[in-house]
């Protein structure tokens, strides 16, 4: 085996090791995030069961915020869609 082949094999082994480490790190991060979201969801459901009126008020507030944002975006898009007209000057004939 020549030096080039040995270096290539070493580089490939190193790349696989780095890839495996990255995959393990990502898998652990996804698992941690999944556990956190599951826990938060469970806590939210429990809080909603204990305080249904508050949960309904929060849901209504969130829906109003989303509706307001959607309305604002629609107005911005509507304004962008209108053709811009040149400003008219009021020139008087003498």
Image (cartoon, rainbow, N blue to C red):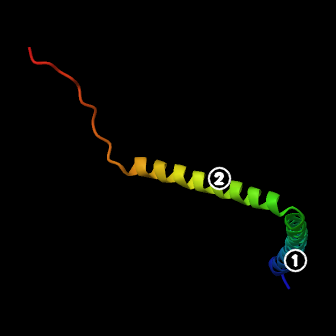
Residue labelled with disc 1? 20
Residue labelled with disc 2? 65
63 to the left or right of 94: right
Q: Secondary structure at mark 2?
A: helix
Q: Quadrant of residue 34?
A: bottom right
Question: Counting other residues with Cα less than 10 Å from the Cα at mark 2, is it few (<14), some (14-19), or many (20 or more)?
Answer: few
User: Which numbered disc covers residue 53?
Assistant: none
Residue at 23% from the left image edge and 25% from the top image edge: 89
Q: CA distance from mark 2 to mark 1?
A: 43 Å
Q: Nearer the viewer, residue 94 or 62?
A: 62
Q: Nearer the viewer, residue 34 or 29?
A: 34
Q: Secondary structure at mark 1?
A: helix
Work out whether 57 lies above or below 90. Answer: below
Task: Please state the horizontal and vertical placement of residue 59, each as a whole percent of the image.
Answer: 73, 60
Residue at 28% from the left image edge and 40% from the top image edge: 85
Q: Quadrant of residue 48?
A: bottom right
Question: Counting other residues with Cα less than 10 Å from the Cα at mark 1, is it few (<14), some (14-19), or many (20 or more)?
Answer: few
Residue occupying the far top of the picture: 94
2 or 1: mark nearer the eye:
2
Residue occupying the far front of the picture: 53
Task: Please state the horizontal and vertical placement of residue 93, each as a whole percent of the image.
Answer: 10, 18
Q: Nearer the viewer, residue 64 or 3?
A: 64
Q: Nearer the viewer, residue 18 or 25?
A: 25
Q: Quadrant of residue 70?
A: bottom right
71 to the left or right of 29: left
Residue at 89% from the left image edge and 73% from the top image edge: 31
Q: Quadrant of the N terminus?
A: bottom right
Do the residues under discs 2 and 1 have CB atoms within 8 angstroms? no
Residue occupying the far bottom of the picture: 1
Q: Quadrant of the C terminus?
A: top left
């Amino acid at each position: 085996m020549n030096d080039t082949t040995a270096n290539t094999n070493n580089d490939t082994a190193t790349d696989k090791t780095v890839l495996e480490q990255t995959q393990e790190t990502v898998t652990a991060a996804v698992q941690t995030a999944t556990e956190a979201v599951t826990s938060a969801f469970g806590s939210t459901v429990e809080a909603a069961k204990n305080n249904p009126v508050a949960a309904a008020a929060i849901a209504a507030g969130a829906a109003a915020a989303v509706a307001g944002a959607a309305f604002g975006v629609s107005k911005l898009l509507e304004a962008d869609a209108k053709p811009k007209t040149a400003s008219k000057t009021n020139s008087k004939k003498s």
